Image (cartoon, grey):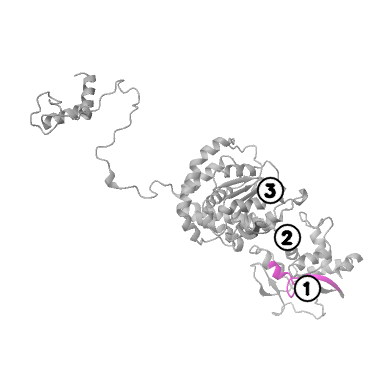
Amino acid sequence: MSGFDDTLSVIDFVISDEPAPHCQQCGRPRSDSPSGDFCSENCQRVWRGRHTAAKPAEDGGAQPSELPEAAPVNPLTWLGPAPVGAFAKPGHEVLDAVVTFVSRFSAFANEHAAPTLALWYAHTHVAERLYVTPRLILDSAEPGSGETRVLEVAQYLVAKPEMTISITPAAIFRMLADGPMTLLFDEIDAVFNPKTGGNNEDLRALLNAGYKRSATVTRCVGDAKSMNVTRFPVYAPVALAGIAGGMPDTITTRAITVHMRKRRFDEVVEEFIEEDVERESAPVRADLAEWVGRVGDEVSRARPERPDGVRDRAAEIWRPLLAIADAAGGHWPETARRACRHFVLEATAQPASIGVRLLADIRQIFAAENTDRMVTAELIRELHAIEDGPWTDVQGKPLDSRRLAKELDRYLVRPKDLKISGKTLKGYRIDGDGGLADAWSRYLPPLETGATSATNAPLQVTATSGAPETPASAATSATRVADGRRTQQPLTPLLTSPVAEVADVAATKPDHDTEGDR
């Protein structure tokens, strides 16, 4: 029988309503066979085997077959569905893939930047379950340092990205009415820089408050006849990129700041072609969102261990990132804590305000002079001598005694009367009411172990009463602040008196300085 006849026979076999008079295999009468097509079970078995057997490829197997593989005769449905997450990537592999992807397009200044970005991107996918979302600041000393490129890549990895260079607070809290989205601000230095006319207190307040889930903005909605008070949620992850120097301190204290720098000539990154980045980032983002979604409840409940010295607001904003790193496993718990130590304790070691910078410089001067008190004129002279200090140009003029007293008064540090060579001059002390020790312990990090401490110095000038003080007395002591706490230490007399030089300087200082001290 030809192939054409075989085909017709199969069709008749399938669609025929009436039983065939003869056996489809051997052609003999079916007689009383119960089958409508075969005279016996043997003929039925032979016919099915001949028509269902795989035929050899006509081209000898030179070309791939266009037909799909045949399903197994007995499907393995008895095994049941695959367990949830059986084919999901582990967290450490997901985060590693994010680090690899972002590092293709940016040359970072240190090893901690890319892992921190990966953790921050991950937290945006579970922000609605968190109580705090840290701000991310990308700043640089000069344009063209890559902060914008980081945002351009981030928009394809974070949850619900909204990239903008100009947006009003009203637009923001209305956009956030349906839940958190990730706001990516570029050129933020133009928004907050006072030299360019930036006066955006509403936006600053919104960004400050919006790092916590409970934050809302209250507005009156409706016309005069039907006015209603509505509370709009403003909680959302926010990344801010721009030139360094113009960011308000109230935002930087709620942020992780990644300093970007221009690439060296020997540093090479891939060309950023947006349509390619969008396509290639899709599986990376999908894996990130899927994994973070699975561990979201664990992350939201976690209370991760933080590095020593990380506390208060710094501990608050790093908590979700450390929790994500712990959930990822592998090297990530240690990698995240190294990054936390870097950004909290090392990269932000400079004072955040001019007042804190003043306290830090005064502590260094007292330590260098090995004294516990200093007259105002000499202290100002030492401040002016700091090469990289701002004290020779504070709002257009050098720091003087009045401005010094005003700045320190905010920290409850006040000038006292000091008797030197029979003269009463104004100056500052470490210990006592209005002394520097309490402010140092509250606003400055502890001194390095073994560093020279100004608070170990003996009392070398007389108090206002003129009564002599006994250096070795346990009642006469300076306050040690090296460990950040007020602890009384007995004073040890020195063979030479460094304050004698201060007295000589004070005796020969110009009259206008004396008047300022008085």
Cβ atoms under marks 1 and 3 closer than 8 Å: no
Choose the circle earlier in sequence order: 2 or 3: 3
Q: Check disc 3 and report its element: helix, strand or loop.
A: loop
Q: Quadrant of the N terminus?
A: top left
Report x, y in % for residue 503: 84, 69
Q: Amino acid at mark 2?
A: Arg
Q: Residue at x 26, y 24 (%)?
A: 56
Q: Is residue 501 visible?
A: no
In screen coordinates, is 256 left or right of 514?
left
Q: What are the residue bounds of the magenta stretch?
A: 424-440
Q: Quadrant of the C terminus?
A: bottom right
**Residues at marks 2 and 3, CA–CA distance in whole angstroms:** 25 Å
In screen coordinates, is 298 left or right of 389?
left
Q: Check disc 2 and report its element: helix, strand or loop.
A: helix
Disc number for residue 357: 2
Q: Check disc 1 and report its element: helix, strand or loop.
A: loop
Q: List the residue tagged with mark 3.
A: 188
Residue 273 vs residue 113, the one in the foreground: 273
Residue 148 vs residue 305, the one in the foreground: 148
Q: Amino acid at mark 3?
A: Ile
Q: List the residue tagged with mark 1.
A: 460
Dot 1: few (<14), some (14–19), or many (≥20) neighbours within 10 Å? many
Choose the circle earlier in sequence order: 1 or 2: 2
Residue 98 vs residue 176, the one in the foreground: 176
